[in-house]
Amino acid sequence: MSKDNGLDTIDFTVVSSASHGGPPKRTGFFQVTLVDVEHRVTQAGNDRLRFSCSVVSGTEAGSVIFDGFNFPAQGQSSKGLSFFKDFMGSFSIEPKDMWKFILTMALQGGMTIDSLADCISAKDLKKVKAMKVPSKMPKLTGHCKYEMPAPGEKYSKVNWFAPNRWERLAAAEEDTNNSPVPTLDTTPLSDYTDNGGESNPILDEILSI
């Protein structure tokens, strides 16, 4: 991370939040765009970010896939951190930009400064207090496999993959069921450029998984 963590230089492409549709009606591999984020507090008292992602093409275009992750903290379980790492990697967010993305999404989702103060360093908190909360979501394309809830189950399952791996897995499934595979979108992440190299303890823990 740079000395100022780049927290005051994030530029968001003008992309309006889409209206929420229902979930996909089938299991499959989907490209999605990030359309909304919401801060929630779990019954256990953990801060959680819930993301809404809209399917971009095919018969399920406009369907919305929801997934959420506890706000990362030092000492959090490796499983919890790995979920967040896989999610960010599926949107092609570079490791050096992940912490900036997490903090920006927390603010945009409505996480309060007081809540963040319990999770981040005093240095990061000072930068966060000076940030202007973006009014638009960043233009990002993610790659996932959505699985319908199993019989008798309430919740669906979502796995997030890096773009290249997603493309291979989707192609393999196409060979199996002859379903069309969306064209891979490789939109550059110019909105998340950070030329620094300073480490962050929580990010280091995420990347060590």
Image (cartoon, rainbow, N blue to C red):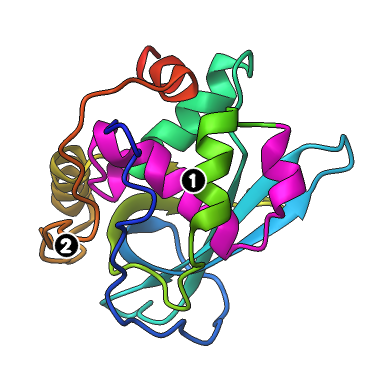
The residue where tag 1 is placed is: 127
In terms of image quadrants, where is residue 69?
top right
Magenta span of residues: 89-118
- Report the front residue among 103 and 162: 103
- How many other residues sit within 10 Å of disc 1, few (<14), some (14-19) or many (≥20)? some
Q: Which mark is residue 166?
A: none
**Kind of residue at badge 1:** Lys
- How many other residues sit within 10 Å of disc 2, few (<14), some (14-19) or many (≥20)? some
Q: Does residue 133 appear left or right of residue 75 in this picture?
A: left
Q: Does residue 85 appear left or right of residue 12 in this picture?
A: right
The residue where tag 2 is placed is: 181
For mark 1, give the secondary structure. helix
Quadrant of the drawing holding the N terminus: top left
**Kind of residue at badge 2:** Val
User: Residue 178, position in %: x, y?
Assistant: 17, 60
Which mark sits nearer the N-terminus, 1 or 2? 1
For mark 2, give the secondary structure. loop
- Report the front residue among 58 and 55: 55
- Report the front residue among 192 and 77: 192
Looking at the image, the residue that sits furthest to the right is 43
User: Residue 9, position in %: x, y?
Assistant: 30, 57
User: Residue 111, position in %: x, y?
Assistant: 68, 55
User: Residue 188, position in %: x, y?
Assistant: 11, 58
Q: In this view of the protein, can residue 160 be seen by the observer?
A: no
Residue 112 colored in magenta in the image = yes
**Residue appearing at x 52%, y 26% in the figure:** 81
**Residue 166 position (above or below residue 178):** above
